[in-house]
Amino acid sequence: MYACRYFVLGTSATAVYYYKTDAAYRKKEEPQGSLELRGGSAFLKEIKSGSHRFTLVTPGRELKLRAPSADYLAWAAALAPIVGEIAPGRGGADDDDDD
């Protein structure tokens, strides 16, 4: 089960921060959490028509994000300078998507 969250690339451009809603971000509430991306990688998997999942993998954590294709393209462009090229997905037995 996943929960919808609002993600923001930090001003340092090396970490993503997540908020419960976009309104929480606009109100400048504290983020629910963050993920440092330096030294990380990213993988893409198309999960539904017009939707993608990209997985951010860092030494300490793996975070799976879902986005419509238009949003995914914007995220991919912003993340590429940090994590490099976003590789095709890594499916497998531990893949818990409910495609």
Image (cartoon, helix red, strand yellow):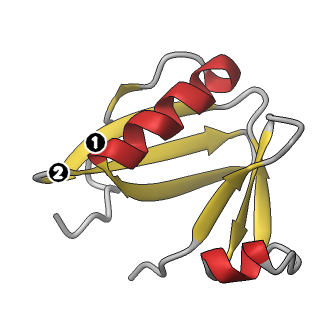
- 85 left or right, relative to 34: left
* Amino acid of disc 1: Lys
31 or 40: nearer the viewer: 31
Q: Which residue is drawn at 81% across and 72% down?
A: 31
Q: Which residue is label 2 attached to?
A: 50
Q: In this view, does 86 lie above or below 6?
A: above
Residue 25 seen in the current view = yes
Q: What element carries label 2?
A: loop
6 or 48: nearer the viewer: 6
Q: Is mark 1 on a helix, strand or loop?
A: strand
- Report the quarter where the C terminus lies: bottom left
Spot occupied by residue 42 in the image (x, y as percentages of width and height): 51, 33
Determine the residue located farthest toward the left in the rendered image. Answer: 49
| Mark 2, other Cα within 10 Å: few <14 / some 14–19 / many ≥20 | few
Image mark for residue 45:
1
Identify the mark nearer the N-term, 1 or 2: 1
- Comparing marks 1 and 2, which lies closer to the viewer? 2
Q: Which residue is drawn at 81% across and 81% down?
A: 27
- 37 left or right, relative to 94: right
Spot occupied by residue 98 in the image (x, y as percentages of width and height): 21, 70
Residue 32 seen in the current view = no
